[in-house]
Amino acid sequence: MKLIHLSDCHFTDPAADALSASKPHPQKTLQNIIADICQWHHDAELCIVSGDLTHDGTPAQYALFADTISALPMPVHVIPGNHDLREPLLAALPQTAHDENGFINYAFIHNGIKIVLLDTLSDGEDSGILCPHRLAWLANELQQSRDLPCLVFMHHPPVAVGLPFMDSINLLNADEFGEVLQTHPAIRHIFFGHVHRPCHGMWRGIPFTGGASSFTGQPLAMQPGMGLPDKPWLEPGYGITLIHDNDATVRYHFETVR
């Protein structure tokens, strides 16, 4: 199975790029990526966007995002990031599921693989949280599918990735999240966004992958207190995920698009 992983699109208002006049509008970079996907990876079965669809969470930004992403030839699933707001997101993308408490948590089975999408948004905060309601929802979903391999998508990393500022605003209750995951014998991979650059590793014995931003990637900033280094920003990018049918193990490729 081939799956497209997008993240951190950060759509601004249609009229102007509110982030920086020196960068193209986030719609333009996503359109370039979609063109690349349609040319080379139109056979992908799913696309998942791991948060920060917009920069300010306005209805106009979500409408522009929804119109742009509709050009993809495969089903698209989204979750919120810290720059998103649930109500306008759901209004613009009404096919997006949510749980009984209004969180954009949902799960489905595709090709015998359980795919879980988590809402880590903490209203008004840059860091993320999985409150008791969301952890209970996750535990129940995992319990219902104990015999299936599982892939988890979220916005905030549950692990420090070595970037001091970003590590200070990741998932605040990662230990509680990890304890819930340990109850499921077949968590194969965790995917997240937020850091605006590709990264990968292991956490609690589970492989993880951080996705690239479809807008712009941050320079590598590993020194505490120094801010972003004077280095070129990463090109917009996306992930192509190949998932083995028998055991849901993951092969992940990054692609950049100028």
Image (cartoon, rainbow, N blue to C red):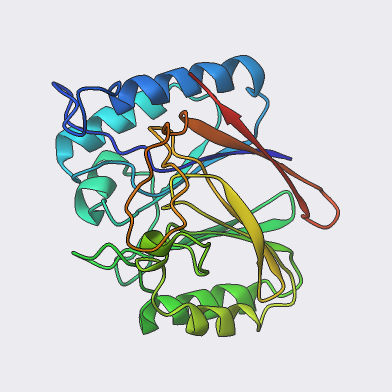
Q: Is residue 177 above or below residue 43?
A: below
Image position, residue 83 (x, y; %): 26, 51
- Above or below residue 12? Residue 162 is below
**Rendering coords of residue 61 (x, y %):** 21, 35
> Which one is in front, 18 or 7?
18
243 or 55, nearer to the observer: 55
Number of marks in the image?
Answer: 0
In the rendered structure, the answer to whether residue 216 lies left or right of residue 138 reads left
Query: Can you see residue 241?
Result: yes
From where the camera sits, is residue 119 visible? Answer: no
Task: Locate residue 218, reporting x and y percent.
Answer: 41, 42
* Residue for point 56% across, 18% down: 36
Question: Height in image: 24 above or below 166?
Answer: above
Q: Tell whether 43 sits left or right of 34.
A: right
Q: Which residue is more in the foreground, 44 or 235?
A: 235
Residue at point 45% right, 63% down? Answer: 118
Q: Quadrant of the N terminus?
A: top right
Considering depth in this image, is 174 or 41 the residue closer to the camera? 174
Residue 221 percent across, percent down from the top left: 43, 51
The answer to which quarter of the image holds residue 252 is top right
Vertical arrangement, residue 220 with respect to residue 41, above or below: below
**Residue shown at 30% from the left, 39% from the top:** 10
